[in-house]
Image (cartoon, grey):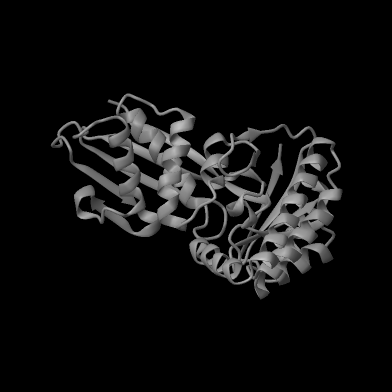
Amino acid sequence: MPAFTATAPGKIILFGEHAVVYGQPAIAVPVEQVRARVVVDPQPRGQPGTLRIIAKDIQLDAWLDELPTDQPLVVAVQLVLSELKIERCPACTIRVSSSIPVASGLGSGAAVSVALLRAFSAFLGRPLSDERVSALAYEVEIIHHGTPSGIDNTVVTYAAPVYYVKGQPIQRFLVPLPFSIVIGDTGISSSTSQSVGDVRLALQAEPDRYQAYFSSIGEIVEQARRCIETQSIQRMGQLMRENHALLQKIGVSCEALDRLVFAAEGAGAWGAKLSGGGRGGNMIALVDEVQAASVAQALRVAGAVSTIMTRVR
């Protein structure tokens, strides 16, 4: 019996993070340069129901029944078994690896979940549809983020640019003119659930002020989608600046992110902003393709621990 393998890309949010939790739209795109990979190896001589999970990136090597029931990999496995109504699966080993930085806003948790859900359901002979993969990955996202927007599991599952409003049908859209993004990693791990929770508390304390911030971000997202669809790419740079300024006001930026945003724009980027939960993790810069390498270099000089150059298409 062969091994079953699945991969899933990372993601960045172009516009709309945090506001998307409160019903505003967001735009996110896949990042194919980094991926999660899951391989399910059958163990024909093993006892039915015995399942070993190996994830060297997080120093994990254990049998399923030795792990906490709320461990995200365990939850993903159990969700598949429940979905397919299987009580005892054939013996197997699940190997998880990923080149996506953890806790950096690149969708590492969602990518691992999506890859696992696909590989494990295929191993069991009943591959899940994209719709079910996304829905089950969202259940795992609750463990990672507390109150997830749903955007990570959506864009990672469909591996395509998406316009997303929580609770509404997914809208995938075409990018008629590809454009370049440079991603800069602050090297600071950040808990999305913590930043989302803090924003929720701030909203409760000052509802009018924060709802106004969210509405303004929503308007920026709508303008950005029109820019993409009409090939007005440079105009998005100014929208990124405006979005970042609002995220600063919301309280989810930090000195390291602001420094990288400033460095990118100083090196010729059309605009830059934090991407994801904030308070660390990654920022993104919109650049002319010929300037991507020089902007990436400027980010490293300004303190980025790594950079990724990607084309959105």
Q: Residue at x 15, y 36 (%)?
A: 46
- Quadrant placement of the N terminus: top left
> Residue 170's image quarter?
top right
Residue 65: give x, y in percent of width and height: 19, 50
> In screen coordinates, is 66 left or right of 54?
left
**Closer to the camera in the image, 31 or 3:** 31
> In screen coordinates, is 34 left or right of 211?
left
Q: Residue at x 13, y 37 (%)?
A: 47
Relative height, residue 124 to residue 219 (above, below): above
Q: Residue furthest front?
A: 208
**Closer to the camera in the image, 91 or 207:** 207
Relative height, residue 9 to residue 298 (above, below): above
Residue 300 at least partly seen: no
Residue 290 at least partly seen: yes
Q: How many numbered callouts?
A: 0
Relative height, residue 10 to residue 193 (above, below): above
Relative height, residue 122 to residue 213 (above, below): above
Residue 186: give x, y in percent of width and height: 62, 67
Residue 139: give x, y in percent of width and height: 41, 46
Q: Residue at x 26, y 56 (%)?
A: 68
**Closer to the camera in the image, 65 or 243:** 243
Residue 111: give x, y in percent of width and height: 48, 45
- Quadrant placement of the C terminus: top right
